[in-house]
Image (tube, coloured by chain):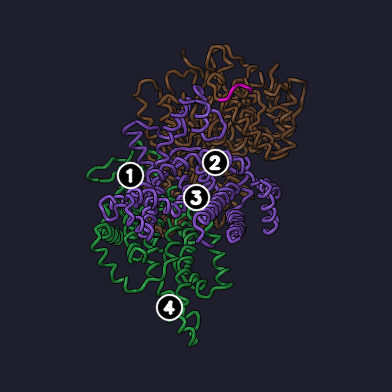
Amino acid sequence: MNRKWTIVTLFLILGLALAGCTAAAPAAPAGGAEAGQAPAESGAPNVLKVAATANITTWDPVKSFSTEALYMANLYEQLLRINPPDAEERFTPLLAESWEASDDGLTWTFNLRSDVKFHDGEPMNAEAVKMSIEAAKERGGASFIWAPLDSIEVIDDLTVQFNLSYAAPLDLIASSLYGAWIVSPKALEAAAADENYFEAGVEAGTGPYMLESYTPDQEVLLTRFDDYWGGWDDVPHFDKVLVLITPEAVQQQQMLEGGEVDLALRIPQENIASFMDKEGYTVDIEPTYFNYVGFFNTLREPLTDPKVRQALSYAVPYQDIVDVATLGYGTQARGAVPAGVWPYSDEVKQYTQDMDKAKALLAEAGYPDGGFDLRLTYAAENPTEERFAPLIKDAFSDLGVNVDIEAILFNQQWEEAKADPPNAQDIFLLLYWPTYSDAGTDNLWSMFHSSDAPFFNLSYWSNEEFDALIEEAASLTVTDPEKAQELYNQAQNLMVDEAPAMFLFDTKAPFVIPDHLKGFKYNLNYPFATFFYPLYEEK
Amino acid sequence: MHRLEFVIRRTAASLFVLLGVSFITFFLARVVPSNAAALYIGPRARPEDIARVAEQLGLNRPLPVQYLVYMRAMLQGDWGISIGTKRPVLQELAQRLPATLELIFAAMLLAVIVGVPLGVISAHRQGKPVDYFVRVLSIVGVSLPAFWLGLLLQLLFFRNLDILPLAGRFNNDLRFTSPIADITGFLLVDSAITGNWVAFFDVGWHLILPAITLAAYPMGLIARMTRGAMLEVLSQDYIRTAQAYGLKERFIVYVYALKNALGPTLTVIGLTMAFALTGTFFVEIIFNWPGLGQFAVRSLLNLDYPAIMGITLFGAASYVLINLVVDLLQAWIDPRIRL
Amino acid sequence: MTTSTVSELAETPPLRTRYSSHVWNVIVRDPLALTSTIVIVLFLLIAVFAPWIAPYPDQGMGRSNPSTITLPPSLEHPFGTDHLGRDVLSRVIMGLRPAFAVPLMVVAVAVLIGAPLGALAGYKGGKTDEVIMRLTDLFLAFPSLLLAMAITAALGRGLRNAAIALIISWWPWYTRLVRGIAISLRERYFVEAARSIGVRDSVIIARHILPNSISPILVQASVDLGTVILAMGGLAFIGLGTQPPYPDWGLMISEGRTSILNQWWLSTFPGLAIFIVVLAFNLLGDVLRDIFDPRQYQ
């Protein structure tokens, strides 16, 4: 295709979008204030304005595995959605009305909602589900979540059956924020032919909103999908959602206070307190399933010695890190499972800072005054890590251990860790979150189960007992959750003792909600997503 | 045909330089950073995907071949796909250019309006307190780090006085109250020609602080160069003759001499404009200005190498082009100049 | 800035050494030059004795102190404290060392690479000249800071790579400067005399051409020092230069930027430090240029 023409077309589309008259009145005079308001008879459209940091790394719902989840979650839907931990029901049915698993956890049958249409007019049916999930398994950014899946069978137009090769909580997997969107078959075919099919800003979901326009790094404009199966009449939902991509938290705050936006998804943490006694705002501090881990490279001297790793784990100033990195909006982690996510448990042990113990352990290991160097890398893109990494350096220096901190791109850190483990960094700081709400098969398995070629297990730790415990626990998750929990606890305590990593902290997300905005409900299982559909304005 | 020969030689030299520049940018981007294919896919990539993308992007071919492929694509307007936005680099640059140019033009206009008169006055009153003041002021201008001045202005005019906006190109409410038509991408122009005065003033309001921040450096330079050029002209024979003929001093300084001092001033204006491009890197971050600078910095930080190549090449090309234009203009004005 | 000043100087005939004796007199007589010199010397002294002057030298080097996070300026902490509880004054003082040392080194290495090449090009002329100058043209075709940023990004973030990138972007300016001087010296009687008695080219360049280029190089270097300090700060500001927790003024401005509206002191003081140092170098350079620019000297 002629590139020049593409550019010209895009400019035209963009121009029209900017003038606010794409869909409704393409021929409307440019610049007219009334043009943008043409569709709504009662005057201005009901627009929700949001400031967010989320950029788009891809518009491909199959590949999506990053911050664009904010938009995906409003354009697309999964079969079902997992509720926050305090909800009565564990799941909300979305495209599936009901589902059931066989006793052995190997066969899952989903009954689909009828009369659901994709934004491109195609019907949502069993065939679409099969195609979407197969695409996700084959080329998805989060394809690994479908590892247990053996085959998908279309039973009838609205019934689809998943056959697994081993028992796995498919309800959790199917509610994943990544790699579980149901996409129009027509778009999937087009994307199979042209890898960049979605990138121009194409979407084909069933969600409440459609993508009207977007300008990279600037804004995303969503507009309501009139035929949304959930309907539009219960509350005065917003007709359009304008997301202004604003990387600066300070500026988001200013936009919120100036009334330029109704919702700012990132306010500087140091300024949250100032909203607590301000009229007109409610501050909502929510748990997240983000978790910070510092891998020790267990292949490198002297970190091969568990005593050294324990000593360092005792030297970490956990409380200071929480205070500095999150300004108190965080909690010290218990092992590698974030609070509120399966299989978190209070019974997992924690280290507390104890320099005497740390020194004693180092002496036992043969390093009475430290005297070794460690190289710590963190992702340069992550300002939180930049904040707390120096605290680790300072604490370790009190043991006589010198830490060189290096900020490199996540990708470079990732490559270095995998290219040549025995010569890789000594400490790898990682912000981790489970792809779907099962930290047993994700966090514990991905980060600490042994493997031949390291993927996320970047301490290169290998412990047969641990492996056996979590393998058994994972296989019991569906059929005997209590037993699974017990095994997971055993495994985690073993892991904390062996200290293949520093278990640093779980973060919390503070939200400042203006009082006129109703219906805001945070869901810790979807930390990158804010669902715009339930929101409305009180008149 | 001396002049024509000059034009041809000068243009040929510029083309040669551009060729070399393309080689340097290619070398920088392709050889040095880490695995380009891995960067392209993003975090959590699997080895097989990296291999596939490396094949797709032609990263397995010998470097000279890659360079030729790259050059051919460049000439056809294919500057690669940005890793960050997954859109064609050329399209990204084109879309962001108007915002940056609007900022640069506003800043340069400010710099010229303030800088040239300061330089003239300073030369006219050489050695007087005014001269002294202007000299210090112009040096202050070139010594102020843009990445600090911008913050100070925000502190003063937004936080303390609360009279100017903190950042952004316009108030977002405009989108719904009086949207700006996208005609040229220059929002001041677009809002003016559609008679959208609410937007016009809002955009102008948002432009003030970033423009001042960006203008400080060229302003200092222009004032200094104008002063120097004026002093030289004023010391020349024909000016003395004019004085001897009893022409009014004001007329001599402000019309006669200034006209002749414009050449060097023009050079400075041209060159600082090219420098202003790097200035926008700082200004656009501080003022959240959706232009090339912001894109450049993010690309540099994320090793978005197709974008980095595009920006460096664009920067160098515009610099070379401005140099060429300035040289040709100079030759036009003053035929004594030779290559 | 460098463009025009360098080309301007390149066209001027070499300086006779007797001008140098005037330097001190002029500096003493010109209040601005005197003040600048005093400021530079003072800052240099502070840099040398930084660990003894800074109230909290270990915090200055990056040691955190979680009990004093983001305190506004007070008697105890005249410049306040930052997000890791570090005393900003100490960080500004400790930051003086890299702020002076690195640009000095960058300019020195750029001169060491650029000047001999320029002397060679100007003295030999012909093919040698052509090759060297075409090469420098390539580098001069980029706005220097843009080139430096691209190189740093490619080499990897950090102070060392930023310094290398700045050297790569700066050496051609000195090649061009010295070449102009060498061309004008080539025809001078003492050079011709040396050549006619069979003195080797390398010796002529080392004995006659380079020594005669020293004064203009110094003038140029003093102005460039200011520019390189700014460039270094700029690189650190966008995140390519010095990495935390080390003290660097540009980095400190960047660290304070996101909370500028609440903690104004974080960016303000390090910025003031850059401004004062750069201003001092530029004022001094301006005065030096007036002395050494023969057009104004006559």
Q: Which residues are magenta?
A: A26-30
The answer to whether residue B140 of the structure is visible from this angle is: no
Judged from this view, the residue extending furthest toward the left is: C75
Kind of residue sitting beneath label 1: Thr
Task: Identify the residue position indicated by label 4 in the image.
Answer: C208
* Separation (CA) of disc 4 from disc 2: 50 Å
Q: Look at the image and give the colour of chain A.
A: brown
Q: Look at the image and give the colour of chain B.
A: purple
Rendered view: A486 above or below C14: above
Task: Identify the residue position indicated by label 1 in the image.
Answer: C268
- Residue B150 placed where, x, y %? 39, 42
Judged from this view, the residue extending furthest toward the front is: B245
Rendered view: A158 above or below A349: above
Q: Viewed as shown, does residue A91 lie left or right of A377?
A: right
Task: Identify the residue position indicated by label 3 in the image.
Answer: B274
Residue depth check, mark 1 versus mark 2: number of the one nearer the observer: 2
SS of the residue under disc 2: helix
